[in-house]
Amino acid sequence: MLTNSASAAAAALLLLSGCATGGGQLAQDVSSLKAEVRTLRRENDELLKRLDAMATQIDLVVARSVPAAVPQAPAAPPATVTGTASVPEGIAVPANLKVVKLEPSGPSKAQKSGKGGSSAPPVPTSTPIQDPSPAAVTALGTGGKSSPSNVQAALDRARAQAGLPRARALEQFADAYPASARSGEALVDAARTRRDAGDPDGSCEDFSRAVAEFPASRAAPDALEGLAVCELRRGRASEASRLQARLVKDFPDSPAGKRASERAPAVQGAAP
């Protein structure tokens, strides 16, 4: 709009300039119009500059108000696998999808060759493996409830051996029949067998076990007597005297109790 006004003023100026020779008044009017035209041109230039600046600001505001596009990661290409697996009928499978059958992972080549990778620690082999005793096998075969005849037969088989094998067989009998009264007798017999075979320490262990585990056994007096002898050998006279006093008090009519009473009459009636 301002540009059209400036053009009209310029056209009027040209017309008036053509008539400038018409008089002094006309010359003054032409000068005034020229000055006005110059003023309008300056104002028009300033307005154009302001319009350009405003347009630039509008562009900046619009650019800031629009959110930046978030970059998206490119789609991963389909994995390449080997092998195939059957797909049940009625299941739709995309064209770019491969169905595979996974095999269980095994040891790597480095582990198989022993040249790298972690491997399981070696299994300790220091613990000896022993076969179960015949008495234990017999007890398991009868569900843990053995008849008296079976118990006696197992005890007879153990006693039929000689030396240290006989002592071990008798100890295994006691392990297999812990609820049998004959186990106390077997331990006393095993203790005497070890003593005769030259194993006094093993003999004392069997006597001690018979006293602790089978106090009501028929062989309990013999077990107390044997353990008292062990304590004397070890130099523990007070413990040996206590065992002899217990033997005299609890089993006075047994052969072992009578021998203890003859050896130490002063212990009669003493508290265990």
Image: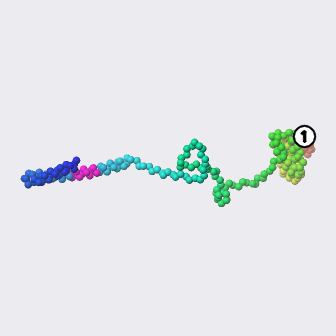
Residue in the foreground of this view, choosing between 245 and 157:
157
The residue positioned 84% from the left and 40% from the top of the image is: 146
Residue 207 among magenta residues: no
Left or right of residue 222: residue 79:
left
**Mark 1 residue element:** loop
Horizontal side of residue 97 vs 31, given as left or right = right
Q: Verify whether residue 47 appears in magenta.
A: yes
Magenta residues (range): 42-52
Q: Position of residue 222 (x, y in %)?
A: 88, 44
Give coordinates of residue 116: x percent, y percent. 64, 59
Q: Quadrant of residue 256?
A: top right
Please name the residue that numbered disc 1 is placed on: 252
Judged from this view, the residue extending furthest toward the left is 23
Residue at 90% across / 48% down in the picture?
160
Residue 251: image location, x then y, percent: 89, 40
Q: Residue at x 51, y 52 (%)?
A: 76
Residue closest to the eye, 85 or 18? 85
Q: Quick one: which residue is furthest to the bottom in this view?
A: 115
Decide if residue 207 is in sight here: no
- Figure quadrant of residue 18: bottom left
Callout 1 amino acid: Pro
Quadrant housing the C terminus = top right
Q: What residue is shown at x 45% (from left), y 51% (from top)?
A: 71
Count of picture labels: 1
Report which quarter residue 115 is drawn in: bottom right
Coordinates of residue 268 in the picture (x, y in percent): 89, 41
Q: Main secondary structure of the magenta part?
A: helix
Estimate how packed mark 1 is, as few (under 14), some (14 to 19) or many (20 or more) residues with alpha carbons within 10 Å.
Answer: some
The answer to whether one can see residue 197 in this image is yes
